[in-house]
Amino acid sequence: MTASRSILIIGASRGLGLGLASEFTAQGWAVTATVRRAAQQAPLQELGVRVEELEMTAPASLEQLSNRLDGQRFDVIFVNAGVAGPDHHSNAQATAEEMGHLFLTNAVAPLRVAERLLPNLAAEHGLIVFMSSILGSIETGAGMGMPLYGASKAALNHLVQSFVRGQDNPKLGVLLMHPGWVRTDMGGANAPLDIDSSCKGMVEQVSAAVGQTGLRYLDYQGNPLPW
Ligand SMILES: NC(=O)c1ccc[n+]([C@@H]2O[C@H](COP(=O)([O-])OP(=O)(O)OC[C@H]3O[C@@H](n4cnc5c(N)ncnc54)[C@H](OP(=O)(O)O)[C@@H]3O)[C@@H](O)[C@H]2O)c1
Protein backbone atom coordinates (compact mmCIF):
# COMPACT_ATOMS: atom_id res chain seq x y z
CA MET A 1 0.00 0.00 0.00
CA THR A 2 1.33 3.45 -0.86
CA ALA A 3 0.99 6.30 1.62
CA SER A 4 -1.56 8.93 0.55
CA ARG A 5 -0.19 12.08 -1.02
CA SER A 6 -0.40 15.42 0.71
CA ILE A 7 -1.21 18.88 -0.59
CA LEU A 8 -1.31 22.41 0.80
CA ILE A 9 -3.84 24.61 -1.05
CA ILE A 10 -3.52 28.37 -0.59
CA GLY A 11 -6.89 30.18 -0.89
CA ALA A 12 -9.66 27.58 -0.52
CA SER A 13 -12.61 29.42 1.06
CA ARG A 14 -14.72 29.20 -2.14
CA GLY A 15 -14.55 28.79 -5.91
CA LEU A 16 -11.75 26.71 -7.43
CA GLY A 17 -9.77 26.44 -4.19
CA LEU A 18 -12.71 24.83 -2.38
CA GLY A 19 -13.37 22.65 -5.44
CA LEU A 20 -9.75 21.50 -5.48
CA ALA A 21 -9.86 20.71 -1.76
CA SER A 22 -13.01 18.63 -2.34
CA GLU A 23 -11.61 16.74 -5.34
CA PHE A 24 -8.17 16.04 -3.84
CA THR A 25 -9.91 14.75 -0.69
CA ALA A 26 -12.17 12.53 -2.80
CA GLN A 27 -9.04 11.11 -4.47
CA GLY A 28 -7.61 10.13 -1.07
CA TRP A 29 -5.10 12.93 -0.64
CA ALA A 30 -4.36 14.43 2.79
CA VAL A 31 -5.42 18.06 2.28
CA THR A 32 -4.42 21.15 4.23
CA ALA A 33 -5.98 24.37 2.95
CA THR A 34 -5.90 28.04 3.91
CA VAL A 35 -8.63 30.65 4.35
CA ARG A 36 -8.31 34.28 5.37
CA ARG A 37 -10.79 34.27 8.26
CA ALA A 38 -11.75 31.66 10.87
CA ALA A 39 -15.44 32.05 9.89
CA GLN A 40 -14.63 30.52 6.46
CA GLN A 41 -13.44 27.17 7.83
CA ALA A 42 -16.72 25.19 7.99
CA PRO A 43 -17.09 23.88 4.39
CA LEU A 44 -13.49 22.65 4.42
CA GLN A 45 -13.79 21.06 7.85
CA GLU A 46 -16.91 19.20 6.65
CA LEU A 47 -14.74 17.65 3.91
CA GLY A 48 -12.20 16.52 6.52
CA VAL A 49 -9.65 19.09 5.38
CA ARG A 50 -7.20 20.55 7.88
CA VAL A 51 -7.64 24.33 7.79
CA GLU A 52 -5.00 27.02 8.33
CA GLU A 53 -5.26 30.79 8.07
CA LEU A 54 -3.32 32.97 5.62
CA GLU A 55 -3.75 36.47 4.26
CA MET A 56 -1.35 36.00 1.38
CA THR A 57 -0.42 39.67 1.00
CA ALA A 58 0.52 40.14 4.68
CA PRO A 59 4.13 39.15 5.48
CA ALA A 60 3.33 38.61 9.18
CA SER A 61 0.51 36.19 8.30
CA LEU A 62 2.86 34.22 6.02
CA GLU A 63 5.50 34.13 8.73
CA GLN A 64 2.96 32.77 11.23
CA LEU A 65 1.79 30.08 8.80
CA SER A 66 5.38 29.11 8.08
CA ASN A 67 6.04 28.74 11.82
CA ARG A 68 2.91 26.62 12.32
CA LEU A 69 3.93 24.34 9.44
CA ASP A 70 7.51 23.99 10.64
CA GLY A 71 8.80 20.46 9.99
CA GLN A 72 5.81 19.39 7.83
CA ARG A 73 6.31 18.30 4.24
CA PHE A 74 3.81 18.32 1.39
CA ASP A 75 4.04 16.53 -1.95
CA VAL A 76 2.33 19.51 -3.59
CA ILE A 77 1.87 23.18 -2.71
CA PHE A 78 -0.88 24.75 -4.86
CA VAL A 79 -1.06 28.56 -4.74
CA ASN A 80 -4.59 29.19 -5.99
CA ALA A 81 -5.64 32.53 -4.44
CA GLY A 82 -6.14 35.46 -6.78
CA VAL A 83 -8.31 38.48 -7.55
CA ALA A 84 -9.90 39.86 -10.73
CA GLY A 85 -8.87 43.49 -10.21
CA PRO A 86 -11.09 46.56 -10.56
CA ASP A 87 -14.48 46.11 -12.27
CA HIS A 88 -13.70 48.86 -14.81
CA HIS A 89 -10.73 46.85 -16.26
CA SER A 90 -9.46 50.16 -17.62
CA ASN A 91 -5.81 51.08 -17.83
CA ALA A 92 -6.80 54.74 -18.08
CA GLN A 93 -8.90 54.67 -14.90
CA ALA A 94 -6.73 52.41 -12.75
CA THR A 95 -5.46 53.89 -9.50
CA ALA A 96 -2.14 53.12 -7.85
CA GLU A 97 -4.02 51.42 -5.04
CA GLU A 98 -6.00 49.17 -7.43
CA MET A 99 -2.87 48.18 -9.36
CA GLY A 100 -0.86 47.64 -6.21
CA HIS A 101 -3.53 45.30 -4.85
CA LEU A 102 -3.91 43.40 -8.15
CA PHE A 103 -0.21 42.85 -8.82
CA LEU A 104 0.67 42.21 -5.17
CA THR A 105 -2.07 39.56 -4.89
CA ASN A 106 -1.73 37.84 -8.27
CA ALA A 107 2.00 38.09 -8.95
CA VAL A 108 4.17 39.08 -5.99
CA ALA A 109 2.48 37.31 -3.06
CA PRO A 110 2.26 33.85 -4.73
CA LEU A 111 6.04 33.88 -5.19
CA ARG A 112 6.60 35.00 -1.61
CA VAL A 113 4.44 32.09 -0.46
CA ALA A 114 6.42 29.63 -2.60
CA GLU A 115 9.78 30.98 -1.44
CA ARG A 116 8.80 30.99 2.24
CA LEU A 117 7.20 27.53 2.19
CA LEU A 118 9.81 25.82 -0.01
CA PRO A 119 11.25 23.98 3.05
CA ASN A 120 7.78 22.42 3.43
CA LEU A 121 7.91 20.81 -0.02
CA ALA A 122 9.07 17.18 -0.39
CA ALA A 123 12.66 17.61 -1.62
CA GLU A 124 12.80 14.51 -3.87
CA HIS A 125 9.56 14.85 -5.87
CA GLY A 126 7.81 18.02 -4.66
CA LEU A 127 5.61 20.04 -7.04
CA ILE A 128 4.59 23.69 -6.75
CA VAL A 129 1.50 24.73 -8.72
CA PHE A 130 0.60 28.36 -9.33
CA MET A 131 -2.88 29.28 -10.57
CA SER A 132 -2.27 31.34 -13.69
CA SER A 133 -4.68 31.93 -16.59
CA ILE A 134 -4.67 31.80 -20.38
CA LEU A 135 -5.11 35.57 -20.08
CA GLY A 136 -1.51 35.69 -18.78
CA SER A 137 -0.22 34.35 -22.11
CA ILE A 138 1.31 37.29 -24.01
CA GLU A 139 0.83 35.40 -27.30
CA THR A 140 -2.82 34.39 -26.90
CA GLY A 141 -4.20 36.17 -23.81
CA ALA A 142 -3.82 39.71 -25.11
CA GLY A 143 -7.09 40.87 -26.67
CA MET A 144 -9.24 38.33 -24.79
CA GLY A 145 -10.44 41.00 -22.33
CA MET A 146 -9.44 41.91 -18.75
CA PRO A 147 -6.04 43.37 -19.82
CA LEU A 148 -5.01 44.48 -16.32
CA TYR A 149 -5.80 41.07 -14.84
CA GLY A 150 -4.04 39.40 -17.79
CA ALA A 151 -0.98 41.56 -17.20
CA SER A 152 -0.93 40.51 -13.53
CA LYS A 153 -0.97 36.82 -14.56
CA ALA A 154 1.74 37.50 -17.20
CA ALA A 155 3.76 39.04 -14.35
CA LEU A 156 3.11 35.89 -12.29
CA ASN A 157 4.33 33.73 -15.19
CA HIS A 158 7.48 35.86 -15.49
CA LEU A 159 8.21 35.76 -11.75
CA VAL A 160 7.70 31.98 -11.72
CA GLN A 161 10.21 31.62 -14.58
CA SER A 162 12.70 33.70 -12.57
CA PHE A 163 12.00 31.66 -9.43
CA VAL A 164 12.55 28.34 -11.22
CA ARG A 165 15.82 29.52 -12.80
CA GLY A 166 17.06 30.61 -9.36
CA GLN A 167 16.55 27.17 -7.78
CA ASP A 168 19.40 24.68 -7.45
CA ASN A 169 17.19 21.61 -6.89
CA PRO A 170 17.06 19.77 -10.26
CA LYS A 171 14.21 17.61 -8.93
CA LEU A 172 11.81 20.53 -8.43
CA GLY A 173 8.61 20.42 -10.50
CA VAL A 174 6.53 23.56 -11.16
CA LEU A 175 3.22 24.03 -13.00
CA LEU A 176 1.51 27.22 -14.09
CA MET A 177 -2.14 26.14 -14.43
CA HIS A 178 -5.04 27.54 -16.45
CA PRO A 179 -8.29 26.13 -14.99
CA GLY A 180 -10.45 26.96 -18.02
CA TRP A 181 -13.12 29.65 -17.82
CA VAL A 182 -15.12 28.51 -14.81
CA ARG A 183 -18.40 29.54 -13.14
CA THR A 184 -17.13 31.02 -9.85
CA ASP A 185 -17.55 34.44 -8.26
CA MET A 186 -14.62 35.53 -10.43
CA GLY A 187 -15.51 33.65 -13.63
CA GLY A 188 -19.18 34.70 -13.57
CA ALA A 189 -22.40 32.94 -14.55
CA ASN A 190 -21.64 32.87 -18.31
CA ALA A 191 -18.51 30.73 -18.02
CA PRO A 192 -18.84 27.40 -19.85
CA LEU A 193 -17.20 25.15 -17.24
CA ASP A 194 -18.44 24.10 -13.81
CA ILE A 195 -16.12 23.91 -10.82
CA ASP A 196 -16.23 20.09 -10.65
CA SER A 197 -15.14 19.57 -14.28
CA SER A 198 -12.28 22.07 -13.98
CA CYS A 199 -11.08 20.67 -10.66
CA LYS A 200 -11.26 17.02 -11.77
CA GLY A 201 -9.07 17.97 -14.74
CA MET A 202 -6.61 19.91 -12.62
CA VAL A 203 -6.34 17.10 -10.05
CA GLU A 204 -5.56 14.68 -12.88
CA GLN A 205 -2.84 17.01 -14.25
CA VAL A 206 -1.31 17.60 -10.81
CA SER A 207 -1.35 13.89 -9.94
CA ALA A 208 0.46 13.08 -13.20
CA ALA A 209 3.00 15.86 -12.66
CA VAL A 210 4.20 14.78 -9.20
CA GLY A 211 7.77 13.55 -9.70
CA GLN A 212 8.21 15.34 -13.04
CA THR A 213 10.84 18.06 -13.06
CA GLY A 214 11.00 21.50 -14.65
CA LEU A 215 8.39 24.16 -15.42
CA ARG A 216 5.29 23.79 -17.60
CA TYR A 217 2.34 26.10 -18.42
CA LEU A 218 -0.74 23.91 -18.91
CA ASP A 219 -4.50 24.04 -18.98
CA TYR A 220 -6.76 21.77 -16.89
CA GLN A 221 -6.85 19.22 -19.73
CA GLY A 222 -3.06 19.02 -19.95
CA ASN A 223 -2.67 21.10 -23.11
CA PRO A 224 0.55 23.16 -23.12
CA LEU A 225 -0.04 26.91 -23.46
CA PRO A 226 2.13 29.42 -25.35
CA TRP A 227 3.98 31.91 -23.17
N1 LIG B 1 -12.78 31.34 -12.60
C1 LIG B 1 -12.09 31.39 -13.72
O1 LIG B 1 -12.65 31.31 -14.83
C2 LIG B 1 -10.58 31.52 -13.69
C3 LIG B 1 -9.90 31.46 -14.91
C4 LIG B 1 -8.51 31.55 -14.91
C5 LIG B 1 -7.83 31.68 -13.71
N2 LIG B 1 -8.52 31.74 -12.53
C6 LIG B 1 -7.73 31.85 -11.28
O2 LIG B 1 -8.11 30.82 -10.40
C7 LIG B 1 -7.91 31.24 -9.04
C8 LIG B 1 -9.21 31.03 -8.25
O3 LIG B 1 -10.22 31.76 -8.89
P1 LIG B 1 -11.78 31.59 -8.55
O4 LIG B 1 -12.47 31.71 -9.84
O5 LIG B 1 -12.00 30.42 -7.67
O6 LIG B 1 -12.02 32.97 -7.76
P2 LIG B 1 -12.91 33.33 -6.48
O7 LIG B 1 -14.14 32.50 -6.45
O8 LIG B 1 -13.00 34.81 -6.49
O9 LIG B 1 -11.97 32.86 -5.24
C9 LIG B 1 -10.75 33.50 -5.00
C10 LIG B 1 -10.09 32.85 -3.81
O10 LIG B 1 -8.84 33.51 -3.55
C11 LIG B 1 -8.81 33.92 -2.17
N3 LIG B 1 -8.00 35.11 -2.01
C12 LIG B 1 -8.07 36.27 -2.69
N4 LIG B 1 -7.15 37.14 -2.24
C13 LIG B 1 -6.47 36.50 -1.24
C14 LIG B 1 -5.42 36.87 -0.37
N5 LIG B 1 -4.87 38.10 -0.42
N6 LIG B 1 -4.98 35.98 0.53
C15 LIG B 1 -5.53 34.75 0.60
N7 LIG B 1 -6.54 34.33 -0.17
C16 LIG B 1 -7.02 35.22 -1.07
C17 LIG B 1 -10.28 34.17 -1.85
O11 LIG B 1 -10.48 34.24 -0.45
P3 LIG B 1 -11.72 35.11 0.21
O12 LIG B 1 -12.93 34.22 0.12
O13 LIG B 1 -11.27 35.36 1.60
O14 LIG B 1 -11.86 36.36 -0.60
C18 LIG B 1 -10.93 32.97 -2.52
O15 LIG B 1 -10.74 31.80 -1.75
C19 LIG B 1 -7.47 32.70 -9.12
O16 LIG B 1 -6.06 32.76 -9.04
C20 LIG B 1 -7.95 33.13 -10.50
O17 LIG B 1 -7.20 34.21 -11.01
C21 LIG B 1 -9.88 31.66 -12.49
Image (spheres, rainbow, N blue to C red):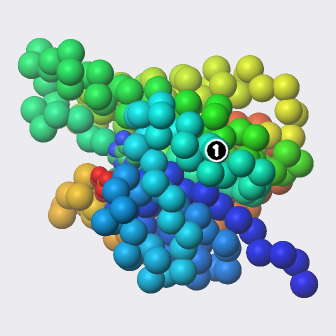
- Identity of the residue drawn at 51% across and 65% down: 51
- Identity of the residue drawn at 90% across and 84% down: 1
**With respect to residue 56, does 156 lie above or below?**
above
- Identity of the residue drawn at 31% across and 66% down: 39
48 relative position to 3: left or right: left
**With respect to residue 196, does 130 lie above or below?**
above
**With respect to residue 218, does 162 lie above or below?**
above
User: Which residue corresponds to mark 1?
Assistant: 67
Q: Which sits in the foreground, 37 or 227?
A: 37
The answer to which quarter of the image holds residue 198 is bottom left
Number of labelled discs? 1
Q: Where is residue 155 in the image (x, y as percent from the top left)?
A: 45, 24
Q: Which sits in the foreground, 219 or 125?
A: 125
Residue flagged by tag 1: what amino acid is it?
Asn
186 relative position to 206: left or right: left
**With respect to residue 214, does 163 lie above or below?**
above
Q: Position of residue 103 (x, y in %)?
A: 36, 26
